[in-house]
Image (cartoon, rainbow, N blue to C red):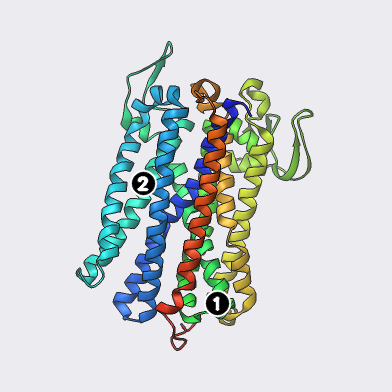
Amino acid sequence: MDDFLAARLQMAFSLGFHIVFACIGMVMPFFMSLAHFYWLKTKKKVYRDVTKAWSAGVAIFFATGAVSGTVLSFELGLLWPKFMEHAGPIFGMPFSLEGTAFFIEAIALGFYLYGWNRLNPWFHWATGVVVGISGLLSGILVVAANAWMNSPAGFDYIDGQYLNIDPVKAMFNDAWFSQALHMTVAAFVSTGFAVAGVHALMILKGKNVAFHSMAFRIAAIFATVFACLQPLSGDISAKDVAKRQPAKLAAMEAHFHTERNAPLIIGGIPDTARKTVDYAIRIPGLLSFMTTGDFNGEVKGLDSVPKADHPPVAVTHYAFQIMVGLGMAMVGLSLLYFLALWKKKLWLRSTWLLKLFVVATPMGFIALEAGWTVTEVGRQPWIIHGVMRTADAVTPMPGIAYSFYLFTAVYISLAVIVSLLLYRQITMVGKLYNSSSEVPKS
């Protein structure tokens, strides 16, 4: 493995792990705060115990997210010094503000974890809300920095120099809103389905049914509501990408030729040599309509982009198809759940519906990783779109391949440890709540 590839793989692997920890850390505090709110309003013991159980999970993911995020900051400096030399002064503001949000989150979490029976009940609840809001802001600020890489703004690039730097304009670049919206919704969907799936499994096993039923209901509502919002945020993102990064859209859709009445391609195997997509389902005109609002609108293909600037088509296309396919599967499950809440109350106690949620447990995070792959791989060969190439930004350390293997082992170990801690936390629920008399009514 050459040093250039190892450096890129190490960064990709680190980000791939961190994005999961970060999204759970962003979203779980809101689940926890809602359960806490119900405890304060109803004084039902089950809500208090759900809150305490989830607060332990929040603490675990806060710690792991902080560690994995710190590793990423070191990697940016060690592996990408040329990139940071030029980009740091421009898009450093969101990272600085993210640090402030992180400190607020840490302080609020400290108050929350140690505030039981020590603080005013509603002030104690408010500190949990602050944990969620500050965590969400941290995620949005980091995404704003990534959005700048896709839509560079806030500077003039003249003769290889970055002049007239405006950090505020850089942070609020053209891509920040669509990316932040899509990522935030994705965080709620992925975490919601994962949490709901775990509690659904516990219900099926007959363990502490009242506790897990209540926890499942809260997580499932978050998951299903945001799953139905995800296609809307996806539409906003797709239109934005079509305008700013036509090469990325073309790779996503394996759209090789510029044309009007462009079909939407579902599935298929791209053949870059023949510039065709085999075994695909084509819906005439739909891609044109989705990107331009006109069934006869023109959609640029890869033939409009110099070959040296083509993203990796196969990886981008497959990742995009996985993201959309799993997203639509979760929308379908969400609609079933809404129908159960509205008309088919008996479905709420059926094993088949719970089993569907168990199957959906990993779907959100797989879709999340696929979406991140689309965002990053689809931007290649640029690290700063249209300004700096990835090959010119990386400065691999000697022996980086060994570092990659070491970091891979560390992250896998971290994932195993976190999984064991969460499993231990879930199995200890019985000690917190061991009553079957408060099974929530449908």
Residue type marked 1: Ile
Residue visible at 47% across and 84% down in the picture? 439
- Amino acid bearing label 2: Ser
Mark 2 Cα shell of 10 Å, populated few (<14), some (14-19), many (≥20): many
Q: Is residue 288 above or below residue 206?
A: above
Above or below — where is 216 with respect to 21?
below
Using the numbered discs, state the Cα–Cα distance from disc 2 to disc 1 in whole angstroms: 34 Å
**Is the residue under label 1 in contact with that under label 2 (CB below 8 Å)?**
no
Q: Quadrant of the N terminus?
A: top right
User: Disc 1 on helix, strand or loop?
Assistant: helix
- The residue lying at 52 percent from left, 51 percent from top is 413
Q: Nearer the viewer, residue 308 or 212?
A: 212
Q: Position of residue 213 (x, y in %)?
A: 49, 77
Residue underneath mark 1:
203
* Label 1: few (<14), some (14–19) or many (≥20) C-alpha neighbours in 10 Å: many
Residue found 53% across the figure and 39% down from its top: 406
Q: In the image, which disc is placed on residue 138?
A: 2
- Picture residue at 57% right of the left edge, 35% below the top: 9
| 85 sits left or right of 110 in the view | right
Instruction: Write down the quadrant of residue 285 in the picture.
Output: top right
Give the quarter of the image for residue 277. Answer: top right
Residue 79, horizontal then vertical, whole percent: 47, 28
